[in-house]
Image (spheres, coloured by chain):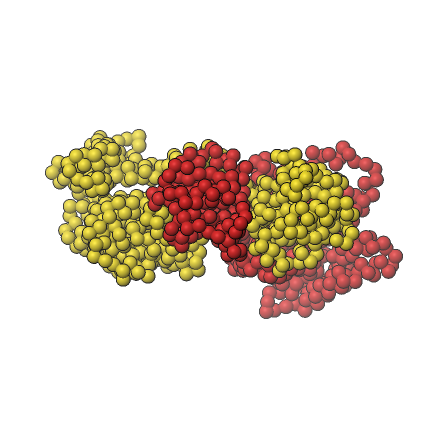
Chain colours: A red, B yellow
Amino acid sequence: MLLWLRQYRRPLLAGDITAGIVVAMMMVPQGMAYALVAGLPPVVGIYASILPPVLYALFGSSMTQSVGPMAIVSLMTAAALAPLADPGSSLYIVLAAQLAFISGLVLLLCGVLRLGFMASFLSRPVISGFSNGAAILIIWGQITPLLGATLPHWHAPSLVLGLSGLLFLWLSKRYASRLLRRCGLNPVAADVGARLAPMALVLAGIALVAYGGLEAMGVQTTGHVPSGLPGLNLATSGAHWRTLLSPALLIAFIIFLMSMSAAQTLAQKRGEKLHTNRELLGLGAANVASALSGGFPVTGSISRSAVNFQAGANTPLASIITAGLLALALVAPTGWLALLPLPVLAATIIFAVSSLLDWDTLKLSWRYDRSDALALLATTAGVLVLGVEAGVVIGVLLSMGTLIWRASRPHIAVLGRIPNSEHFRNVERYEAQTLPDVLLLRIDAGLFFGNVEAVTERVEDELRGHPTARHLVLVLSAVNQIDSTALLGLIELNGALAKRGISLNLAEVKGPVMDRLRQSSLLKDLSGKLYLSTALATNDLSGKKSGEPA
Amino acid sequence: MLLWLRQYRRPLLAGDITAGIVVAMMMVPQGMAYALVAGLPPVVGIYASILPPVLYALFGSSMTQSVGPMAIVSLMTAAALAPLADPGSSLYIVLAAQLAFISGLVLLLCGVLRLGFMASFLSRPVISGFSNGAAILIIWGQITPLLGATLPHWHAPSLVLGLSGLLFLWLSKRYASRLLRRCGLNPVAADVGARLAPMALVLAGIALVAYGGLEAMGVQTTGHVPSGLPGLNLATSGAHWRTLLSPALLIAFIIFLMSMSAAQTLAQKRGEKLHTNRELLGLGAANVASALSGGFPVTGSISRSAVNFQAGANTPLASIITAGLLALALVAPTGWLALLPLPVLAATIIFAVSSLLDWDTLKLSWRYDRSDALALLATTAGVLVLGVEAGVVIGVLLSMGTLIWRASRPHIAVLGRIPNSEHFRNVERYEAQTLPDVLLLRIDAGLFFGNVEAVTERVEDELRGHPTARHLVLVLSAVNQIDSTALLGLIELNGALAKRGISLNLAEVKGPVMDRLRQSSLLKDLSGKLYLSTALATNDLSGKKSGEPA
C-alpha cells in the first residue's frame, strides 16, 4: 500500500498538479449533474468527489483512476431509492449515504475474500448492452429538465438554452482541440483543454442567469448550494437496512464492473499490473468514505480517468489534488453555483452519457457470434422494459446462458486411422479407417457440469450409430479439466456401458487431469483401460472381445 | 408424439398393468403426504396424481417417468404461498393451482424455445447440497405432526404411533424384501412388494384409528377427504399473478431439474435417448393439467419412477393405469381415508425424504475437488438459513461462481524446443530451449469472457518476466473456442503490444476457431503472423527484428 507515495519523485509532480486541476474543473459540473441523475441535491455530487478519491488513492491499485460520481451508478441509486422516499427529501439523502455504506462494506468484504474474479461474470456484449440501456434511460430522464417542462409541453427559453448547450458541446468535441492548437497550445494541452467545454458551458450558463435575466423568463436553476465541507457522520435509517441490501449488492457489482473496465483500459495503456482484489478494497473504502461524508455510491469513471491520464496524472496524488481543490471550492462562497441553469446541466448529462452508447460491440458480435449479439440486444431490452436492477440480473443470466448453451453443443469427433500411419484424425475431414468393434471419440472441450450430459448423450448417439462397437475409447487430448459433476457422469457412463457389454477406455489423458483422476474411483472401476496414446489403444483393443482381461 | 402407443405390442401389457397398480398404491399415501408438506388438504395430492401423469404420457419423452407430487416441489410451493394466504384456506388452494399453472406455462414456453440446455445451470454437488437442505427443512417441518404437539411438548400416543411407524418403515426397508422372498415371491416381486410398506403402514394406521380408539386419545387424523373427481376449472386470483411469477419461475426450474435427473438415471439404465425439450413440454402440460384439476405443482420423482421401472413398466401406459386407479379410488367411498392418523403420515414423509439426504456426493467431491464440496455445503447452508427459494438462486450463483473461478486460473505454459527436434514442450516439465526474443505461450483453455482477462494478465506477467521478447507467439492448439469478449481482448492485446514494439503471432489455430476468426478484424490487423505450427513460427521469428516485414 502507498508504494507510489514512498517512491514519489519530484519530476512526477508537474503532471499530477495539472491533472488534478483539470479533473477538478471537470468534476464540478459532472458531480452536480450525476447527483441530479441520482435524485439528489447537486452539492451531494461534490461531497462524493472529495473523500472517496482520497481513500481510493490509499487503498486502490490503479495509478490514474478517478473515483467519484458516475452516471450508471447514479441511475441505479435512483432506481433503488425511488420506492422508498421522495427524491431530494432528507430521508432520500440519508438512504443514498446508507446505500453507499452497504455497497462499500460489500466491496470490502469481497476484497478480503479475494472475490475479484467476479468481474468476469458478465460478457462484454452483455456489459455493452447494459450500458446502452442505462444510457438511454438516463438521457430519457433528462428530457424534462432540457425542455423545462414535461412532454408534450416545453418551455421555449429552457429548450433554446439546452439545445444551444448541446450544440456547443458537440462543436467543442469536433473543433475545440484543433482551435486550441491553432492558438498555439501543444497537442496534448489542446486535447485536455477541449475536455473542459462542459465547465465553460456551465460558467456561461451561470453568467447568462446572473446578467441575462434568464430566471425571470422561468428557466430553472439548481438553487441554493450550501457552502462548507460536509460533516463526518453516518445518518442511518435502521428501518431500511434490509430493503437496501439487495439493491446494494447489485450496485456494488456494477461499481466494481465499471471501475474494472476503466482500470483495465488504463493499465493496458501503461503496461501496468492490475490488482483486482486491491481494486475491491479501494472502491469499498471510497464508498464507505462517501457514505460518511454525506455522499452517495461512487466508482471509477472511464471518461474522467482517461482525462486524468491524458492530462498527465502519474500517481493518485493527482486525485488528492482534485479533492483538495473541490474542498476549497466548497469553503469559498458557493452562491454562484446556485445560478446554474438546469437545462445546461441536462445538456452536459445527455452529452456525457451519449458517449456510453456503443454500437461497435454490437456490430462486431453480430458478425462474429450471433448469440453474443442477441444477448447484447436482450440485455438492452431488459434494462429498458424491466429497469436497471433487473437488467443486471438479466445480464448475468444471459452471460451464463450463452456459456452453458455453447457448452451444450460440444465438438466431438469420431477418429479413424490415416492408412499406413500412427495418426488418427476426424473421419469427417480425413480419409481415415475405423474398426468395427472399437469406437474412438475425441472430446474437444473441458468436461464440466455444463456439458457432461450433452457429451454422454452424444456418446450414446455415436454408440447407437456403431452397434458393433464393443470398446469405446474416449480420446481426452483436448480435455483440460474434469469437474466433480463430469466425474460422476463418467462413473455412471462406465457402469451403464459395462452392463451392456461395452468397455470404456481412456486415452491421452493430460497430466493435470490425470493427477485429479487418481483421487477418484473412476480409474479403479474402469471397465476398460487407460492408454498413453490412441495408437496404443487401437492396437491393443482391435479384435479383442469385451470383458476379456486386458 | 405417442410413438409408444402406435408401436404398442401385447407382451408389454402385463408389466404395465403390474407397475400401474403398484405405483397407484404408492401414490395414495405419497400424494396425501406431499400435499400436507405443501400446506394443502390431502385430497389435493390425489387430484395432482390423476391428470398430470396422463398429460405427461402424451407429451413427455421418458417411458417410465412417474409424474405427480414431489417433496421438494411441495416445500417450494409452501414457501411461495406462506406469505400470501393461510395454509389450507380456500385462497391458498386457489393460489397453489395458479402456481402450477404459471410454472406449467413457463415450462411449455421453455420447451417451445428449446431451452432444455438450462438443466445444466447447476452442478451436481450444488444440486446435492440443495436437496440436502430441502430434505432437512421438510423433516424439520414434520416434527410437530410426528409429536402431535409443538416442541418442547409432545403428545405421547401420537409420538408412540409416529416412532413405531418410522421403525416399521426402517425394518421393512432392511428385511421386507428378504422376508417376501422366503415366502416364495421371486426377487423382483419381493423388492417391489417391500416398496408398498408405506401403504401397509397407512392401512394399519387407519385400522388402529377405526378400531383402537386412537381418536379418543387425541391423535389427529387427516379428516374429511371429499369423494368424487375434481372439477375441471381454473379458479384464479388476478391479484396475485405478479407476486407468483418469480416463485413460479424458480419452481419451474426445480420441476425441470428434478424430473431430468430422474429421467436421466432411467434412460441410462434402458439405453434410451432423452429428448430434453420434449421433457419440458411434458412437464409443462402436466402442470397445466394439475392446475385445471385442482392440483398443485408436480414433477417426476426419482424414487417413484424407480419403483415404476422396477415393477415392470414398459411404456407410459403404466402411468395412465395408475391415474385410472386413483380416479376410481376417489369415486369409491373415501370415508376410510379420513381416519388416517397424522403421525403415521409424518413418519412416511420423514422416511421418504431421508432418502434424499446424500452424503456420497459430498465425500466424493471433498476428495476430488474441494471447491465443489464447499459449494455443496454453502448451498445447504443457504437453503437452511435463507430458505428454499433463495437456495435455488444461491445454487445457480455458486455453480457459475466455481466455473468462473476455475476459468480465472487458466493453465498457460511457456514452451521451449526439445533439443534437436521439432517438438515444443512446457519448459517447467521438460529440458526445453527458449529464445531470447521469441516468447511461446500455449493456452490450455477455450477463451471466453470468464478467463480472457486472466489470460491477458498472465501474458503480461510472462512478458514482464521475458523483457527481451520482441515476438509473442500464442499457441492455440488446445483452444476450442474464442467468444466475442475474448476476441475483443485479443484485439486490444494486439494493439497494446504493437505500441510497445512487440508483435503478436498465432500458431496452431484449430479449424472451427479459424473459421470464426476469419469473420473478424483481428487477423487483418495482427501485428505478427499466423503460423500452422510452433516450429514454423520459431524458425521464422528467431533473429528477426520486430516490425520487419514477415
Query: Residue A377, position in %: x, y?
Result: 56, 60
The answer to whether one can see residue B290 in this image is: no
Residue drawn at (76%, 32%), measured in percent from left and top?
A6
Where the N terminus of chain A falls, by quadrant?
top right
Could you say which is closer to the camera, residue B289 or residue A49?
B289
Which x, y percent locates residue A311? 78, 49
Q: Residue furthest right?
A: A184
Q: Quadrant of residue B163?
A: top left
Q: Is residue B229 left or right of residue B500?
A: left
Residue depicted at x 44% and y 50% = A435
**Residue A496 or residue B27, whichever sits in front:** A496
**Residue lying at 63% horizontally and 44% vertically, measured from the top left:** B442
Estimate the x, y position of residue B429 in percent, counting from the top left. Answer: 61, 34
Q: Is residue B383 left or right of residue B184?
A: right
Tally the numbered discs: 0
Q: Is residue B411 visible?
A: yes
Please provide percent x and percent y for residue A100.
Answer: 60, 44
Between A151 and A518, the residue placed more toward the observer is A518
The residue depicted at 66 percent of the width and 41 percent of the height is B421
Please give left or right for residue A17 compared with residue A72 in the image.
right
Quadrant the C terminus of chain A occupies: top left
- Residue that sits furthest to the front in the current view: A420
Comparing A400 with A472, the one in front is A472
